[in-house]
Image (cartoon, rainbow, N blue to C red):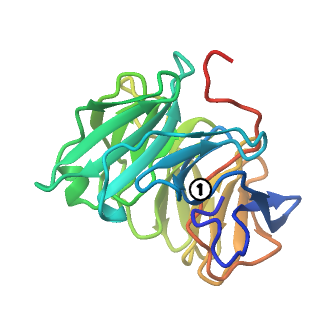
């Protein structure tokens, strides 16, 4: 799902990139509300800017058209001084919107909105390292019961446990380089890293409870070039890669094969993973 959905479109819509039967295509949902940039996604729900209220956000299910406008939290003057996360508690089923804001002194403040309790509340934010390494402006990855903020050219991620609402660092198995990414893979946290010109390693973290990274797979190709991992498909777990020439590739773990997907997008907008669902944010329903 594209982070800037209404770009070059006369309609108020959400655009998405779909992969099916070895082909890629662009579709769109018409919106029942006036919204723009997508902040985060979770289980078929999307968090967007509320164009009718400065600093406001809304949560929408584009399939059911159900929508809720959240009360305005802490205002931010610059988009690179805040970051939104969106996740569901595995324990209570409660959906939470996490909002990180950089204050005037350079510290990261955190507030969380419960879509069940319908209120914002302050919690202790992450350490200063998140600010120093440019974590703001990036959308965190949701996996293994936590939100994980990525850092390029770093050797760790900053994670917040969704239930405990506490921040801590997770060391990566190796430093993250330009085309490396963390993504969700079959419910686990995955680290896709370019070992050399012909090999891409897939590392997996299955839990935050003292588990260590394990190298799950090594992809061998003629050249990794500038292959950037975008996401993994929910049902098969195939990893989708995008290259600078607009091509898409899918790696099938079962077949151990990299296949080019029909259809190119030369200037791929910032995008987020999404799956169609009838889910609601109200834990009572």
Residue 283 in the image: above or below residue 216: above
Residue 231 coordinates in the image, percent (x, y): 62, 54
Asked whether 217 or 280 is in front, the reply is: 280
At 22% from the left and 56% from the top, the residue drawn is 131
Outermost residue to the right: 21
74 over 267 or under it: above or below: above
Q: Is residue 193 left or right of residue 66?
A: left
Residue 14, relative to residue 263: is it above or below? above
The image shows residue 2, relative to residue 191, as above or below, that is: below
Residue drawn at x 66%, y 83% is: 266
The residue shown at (19%, 52%) is 103
In the rendered image, the quadrant that contains the C terminus is: top right
Quadrant, the N terminus: bottom right
Residue 29 percent coordinates (x, y)? 77, 57
Q: Is residue 3 left or right of residue 158?
A: right
- Residue on which the image places disc 1: 272
Quadrant of the image occupied by residue 211 = top left
Residue 107 pos. (x, y %): 16, 49
Residue in the picture at 33% in, 55% down: 82
Residue 113 can be seen, yes or no = yes
């Amino acid at each position: 799902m594209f982070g800037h959905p209404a770009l070059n479109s006369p309609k108020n819509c959400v655009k998405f990139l779909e992969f099916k039967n070895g082909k890629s295509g662009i579709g769109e949902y018409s919106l029942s509300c006036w919204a723009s940039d997508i902040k985060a996604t979770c289980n078929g729900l999307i968090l967007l800017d509320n164009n009718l209220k400065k600093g406001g956000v809304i949560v929408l299910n584009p399939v059911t058209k159900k929508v809720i406008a959240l009360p305005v939290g802490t205002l931010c003057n610059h988009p690179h001084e805040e970051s939104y996360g969106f996740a569901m508690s595995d324990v209570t089923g409660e959906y939470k919107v996490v909002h990180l804001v950089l204050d005037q002194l350079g510290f990261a403040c955190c507030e969380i909105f419960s879509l069940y309790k319908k209120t914002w509340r302050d919690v202790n934010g992450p350490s200063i390292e998140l600010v120093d390494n440019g974590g703001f402006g990036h959308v965190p990855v949701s996996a293994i019961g936590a939100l994980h903020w990525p850092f390029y050219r770093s050797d760790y991620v900053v994670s917040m446990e969704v239930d405990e609402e506490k921040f801590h660092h997770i060391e990566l198995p190796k430093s993250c380089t330009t085309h490396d990414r963390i993504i969700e893979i079959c419910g686990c946290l995955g680290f896709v890293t370019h070992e050399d010109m012909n090999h891409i390693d897939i590392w997996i973290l299955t839990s935050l409870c003292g588990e260590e990274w394990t190298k799950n797979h090594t992809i061998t190709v003629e050249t990794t070039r500038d292959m950037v991992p975008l996401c993994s498909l929910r049902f098969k777990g195939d990893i989708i890669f995008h290259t600078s020439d607009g091509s898409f590739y899918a790696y099938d773990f079962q077949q151990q094969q990299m296949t080019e997907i029909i259809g190119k997008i030369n200037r791929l907008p910032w995008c987020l993973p999404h799956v169609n669902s009838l889910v609601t944010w109200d834990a009572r329903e």
